[in-house]
Structures are given as structure tokens and as C-alpha cells.
Amino acid sequence: MSEKYIARSSKVGARELGGEMVIMSAADSTLFSLSEVATRIWQAADGRTPLSEIVERRVCAEFDVPREAAYRDALAFVEELSSHGVLRVADHPLSEEEEPLPEAP
Amino acid sequence: MSLMTEMNNRALRLGVPFSVHFDLTYRCNERCEHCYLDHDDHGEMTTDEIRSVLRQLADAGVFFLTLSGGEALMRRDCFEIIEYARSLSFNVKLKTNAMLIREKQARRLRALGVEQVQISVYSHRPEVHDAVTKVPGSFKRTLAAIRLLRSYGLRVTMANVLMRGNHGDSEGVRALALEVGAVYKLDPTITPMMDGNKSVLRLRVDASELTSFFHNPNLVGDVENFCAPPPAVDESIREGLPCSAGHTACYISPYGDLYPCVQFPITCGNVRQQPFLDIWRNSPQLAEVRSIRAKHLTTCSSCSHLGGCTRCPGLAYMEGNMRGPSSADCEKSFVRTGIVTAGMLARKAAASSPAPGLVQISPVPSLTA
């Protein structure tokens, strides 16, 4: 299993509301409300920490869930947010540099 | 329940100002005949003051931030402000006439992750649009900017304000929106000026014109649903809130004044003199606005439209009573459903009652002596 790295997109609006994150994608205006667990993963998505470590430290340590199931759920969540451009996912660490600017039409 | 409604309900429970409309300036490069603003600069907030307000808004939990004006891009620091707002993770919507948007600005807005740009378009015919804005060539520049923004993938909403001079062009604007890939938004509301001057209300379309809009599926969608009779009034409707103004939303002027909404000009405080959260939590004016439930409305509480009316408390306030009816919304409810409103009946009764000055209220000495 290759390690995954995740980084928050700079193209979204995000705010914590009552302990849970509300996110709107600027790419397609989809609104998301993250659960408390998903909020922890989002907050830890710095592009440098491996997803497995995020799950270990921010999910398993704080919530009573088995590691394997937690990682499987986290991966599904990350892939869904990635499909809306809300999270960037890669097999290597991601820099915090701005995402590429759009090309001139 | 939609996710948006769920989030708004959560914000309401938590007392969080989820949406803020922030006018950065009242200056403008157009002179639209229906505009409710004084375009002179009476001392706008500085860049540093605005940055401070934005930090306070983020700390207070504001998520949806609408930046507008006047014409927001008239400020030289507009992009600096947008960039700062985005760095604080606001969902940013920009309202603009787009006259100052060229290649560079469109690219920057896209790069900054602005979620939506709303642009007023009054007609698909240049001469009609330009007659509203009083700027020759404005239609051409605005439309060019819309195409540019769309080419960069930005979501554009074309807001079509209906007035006497352009009401025949709504289908044309809708078709134009479709052609350029913009969202079409019909707005039949003309509001009095911020200072209470009502002269612009002469531009409002009349009831017969409203009828044709409200029965046009291209403009309102499902006509049967849109024009359906209001739901029966029950306890949940009577306990309902008039709107989000002052509850989960508020407005900040370029001078720092805080109102419940841009259409509700009751000053609740000034962010130059008081921290935002202090005003949000402790303003007596906001407390009064928040205390009002549908059952407290002076005339509307007995109206059959109570659960279906779009009554704007700000327009009611500008008519003299924030708990009273808004005549423009009475008219809309009537035009949609054909059912007379309590506000219309009250106005009719008031108009037909004898003038107060003719009523004898003192005893006549010769008869009582």
C-alpha cells in the first residue's frame, strides 16, 4: 500500500461551525459539512503528514475506532473530497505553494 | 432539509453570524437610475481597518462573505482585500458591474478562489442597459467581462433588476445568461434610498407586469408551485422568524455601520468604535429585531399569507414599522396567488376612514354646561 499525502485546496471557503467544518468548493459551489472525525482529518491535511499518521494520531487516538477501518473510511472520504477539488491527494508530500494559475483563454 | 438550511439552522442555534454583506465603498462608475446609494465618499474605512474587521468576522464564525458597493473595484485595494479575505478562508462572492474587469482581473479572481461573481445586467439591448446605468458603452464592457470571467471558469450570476424601463427584456437577459453560461436571477425589488428617499420607487413595475413575470415558467420555474396558495397558518409558522437579517446575517457599510441587512438600515453599532462581536451580541437594535416572531407582526400575523410571503422586514422598516407589512411584498403575494393580503385590506381601510383632523374629540361647551 503506497502512502498518501493530503493538502487542503486553497480554492475553498472553510469555517468551523459548532465543532464541525463547513466547506464550499469554489470550483463547483458544492457545500460540504464534515463530521467531527472528518474535521480532524481536514485540519491535519498539511501536505506533509502521511494520511496513515493523521488517522493514527487524530482519529484512532481521539476516537474509539480500529485503525484499519478508520484508514479505509478516511481514504474514501479523502477521495470524495478530492473529486470536488477540495483536497489535493498524492503519493508524495505536497507543497503549500499555490495551485497552478488558470491558463489564459 | 437541504444542507444549506441545516447549516443556517445550526448557525442560528449557536448565534453565529454565518453571512455578512460588506460594502467596501459607495463610490461607483455607473449612475443607475434605481440606485439607493449616495455615491460620495464620506470617509470610507482604510485598508487596515477593513483587514481588522475581516479578522473579527472570521473569528466570529462568518463563512459567506459578500463584497460589494457601490462598485467595489473602485477601491485600489480591492484585490488586496479579496486576497486577505480568502487567506482567512471566507467563501467570497463579489458583486460588481464588471466595468473594471479585464484579463488580469478575471485571472486574479479565479486564482484567488472567489466562489461567485454577481453582475447586474438590465437588458440584452445595449441602449436599454446603458440608459439605466447612464454610462454609454457599459453594456459592451460588462458583457465582455462576463465572457472573460466565464472563460476562466468563474461562476457568474446575472442579476436582472426589473424596472418600468426594462421589464420587457427579462426573456432576452435570460437567453443571454444561458448563452454565456451564467446563472440568471430575476429581481423585481426596487428599494428606497438609504436616507429614506422614496423617489426611486416610481421605477417599480406595476402589478399587471409582475403578473406576467410570476406566471412565466422560464423566469420562475414551476408556476403552479410558485403561485400556489399559501400554506395554512399553524403554530410553527406563527413562531417562525421573518428572515435571517440580524439572526445569522448582517451588513457592514463602508463607514463601519452595522445593519441587520443592506435593505434594513437601522444602525446597530459601528465597527470603528466597537468590536464586531460586541455589537453582534449586545446591540439593543439587534435584540429587538431578533425578538420578533411572525405572531408578533402587527398586521401580517392575521394574514393568510403568513407562511408563504416574502415579507422583507427592512422594507417594512423603511415604510415606518419593522413589525408592519411591506407593501411591495403584499403586492407580490397578491399577484402570485390572487389572494388579497391583510396589509392591502388595512391600507384600504385606512384610506377610506375619515381624516383624523375632522373628528370631534373635545366636548362642545354649550352642550355639556
Image (tube, rainbow, N blue to C red):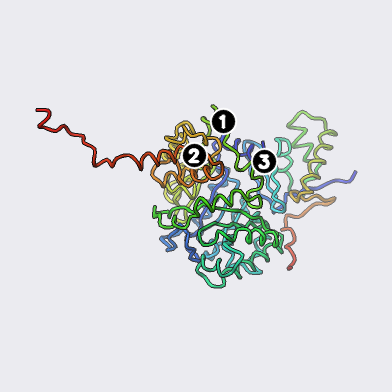
Q: Earlier in the sequence, mark 1 or mark 2?
A: 1
- Residue that mark 3 sits on: A21
Q: Amino acid at mark 2?
A: Val
Residue A90, image x and y in percent?
A: 82, 51
Q: Are marks 1 and 3 in contact (CB under 8 Å)?
A: no
Q: Which residue is mark 1?
A: B232
Residue at (71% x, 60% y) in the render:
B153
Tell whether A87 sits left or right of B115.
right
Circle number at residue A22: none
Q: Secondary structure at mark 3?
A: strand
Mark 1 vs 2: CB contact within 8 A: no
- The residues tagged by marks 1 and 3 sit, at their Cα atoms, a distance apart of 37 Å
Q: Residues within 10 Å of mark 1 (few under 14, many from 20)?
A: few
Pointer 2 residue: B340
Disc 1 versus disc 2: nearer the observer: 2
> Relative to B59, does residue B121 appear above or below in the rendering?
below
Give x and y (percent) for residue B208: 52, 51
Q: Chain of mark 3?
A: A
Q: How many marks?
A: 3
**Side of B220 where B24 appears, left or right:** left
For discs 1 and 3, the disc positioned in front in the rendered view = 1
Q: Residue furthest bottom?
A: B136
Of residues A28 and B147, the one drawn nearer to the viewer in this rendering: B147
In the rendered image, residue B319, in percent from the top left (x then y), is placed at 40, 46
How would you rate the neighbour count of disc 3 (Cα within 10 Å): few for under 14, some for 14-19, many for 20 or more? some
Give me the C-alpha separation between circle 3 and circle 2: 45 Å
> Hey, which residue is sitting farthest right in the picture?
A1
Q: Amino acid at mark 1?
A: Ala
The answer for which chain carries disc 2 is B
- Whether discs 1 and 2 lie on one chain: the answer is yes
